């Protein structure tokens, strides 16, 4: 199974930078191969266009037996580590990971919490 991943521009994470960090970690790379696909050519009418302005990340090769919640938790863990490493502390800005499904497509969306 394959998923698309959209990261809020508020978090200032470049799609290529995140895909590279994902693939360098053996746990996440074993789950799926990540590649930045640039600006989306597909239409995602259910996602704010700003969310995909900086590009999408394509997670390819997730085993069909792996639950979407496992993938979502791994994305959350990788985003937390990415943000913490960038800030130089263990604290990452608050964010949430949600899944938007339409038909057979699932898009994992990472949004900054504004609380």
Image (spheres, grey):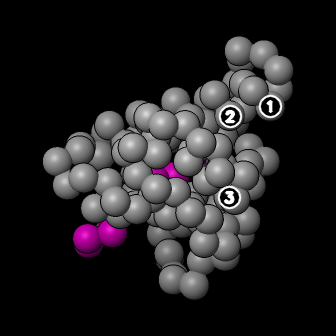
Number of other residues with Cα within 10 Å of mark 3, as a class: few under 14, some 14 to 19, many 20 or more: many
Are the residues tagged 3 and 1 within 8 Å (C-beta)? no
Residue 86: which numbered mark, if any? 1
Q: Is residue 45 left or right of residue 100?
A: right
Could you tell me residue 33's position as x and y percent? 46, 56
- Verify CB contact (< 8 Å) between mark 1 and mark 2: yes
Q: Give the extent of the magenta segment.
A: 102-110
Residue lying at 65% horizontally and 51% vertically, measured from the top left: 20
Looking at the rendered image, the quarter that the N terminus falls into is: bottom left
Task: Determine which of the numbered discs, if any, sits on residue 15 in the image.
Answer: 3
Where 68 falls versus 15 (above or below)? above
Q: Is residue 106 magenta?
A: yes
- Tell me the residue at 72%/25% (across/down): 84
Report whether 1 appears left or right of 31: left
Tell me if residue 52 is in the magenta stretch. Answer: no
Residue tagged 2: 82
């Amino acid at each position: 199974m394959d998923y698309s991943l959209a990261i809020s521009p508020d978090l200032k994470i470049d799609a290529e930078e995140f895909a590279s960090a994902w693939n360098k970690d053996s746990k996440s790379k074993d789950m799926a191969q990540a590649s930045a696909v640039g600006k989306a050519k597909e239409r995602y009418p259910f996602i704010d266009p700003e969310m995909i302005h900086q590009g999408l990340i394509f997670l390819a090769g997730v085993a069909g037996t792996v639950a979407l919640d496992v993938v979502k938790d791994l994305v959350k863990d990788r985003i937390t580590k990415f943000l913490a490493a960038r800030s130089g502390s263990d604290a990452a800005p608050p964010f949430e990971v949600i899944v938007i499904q339409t038909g057979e497509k699932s898009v994992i969306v990472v949004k900054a919490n504004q609380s």
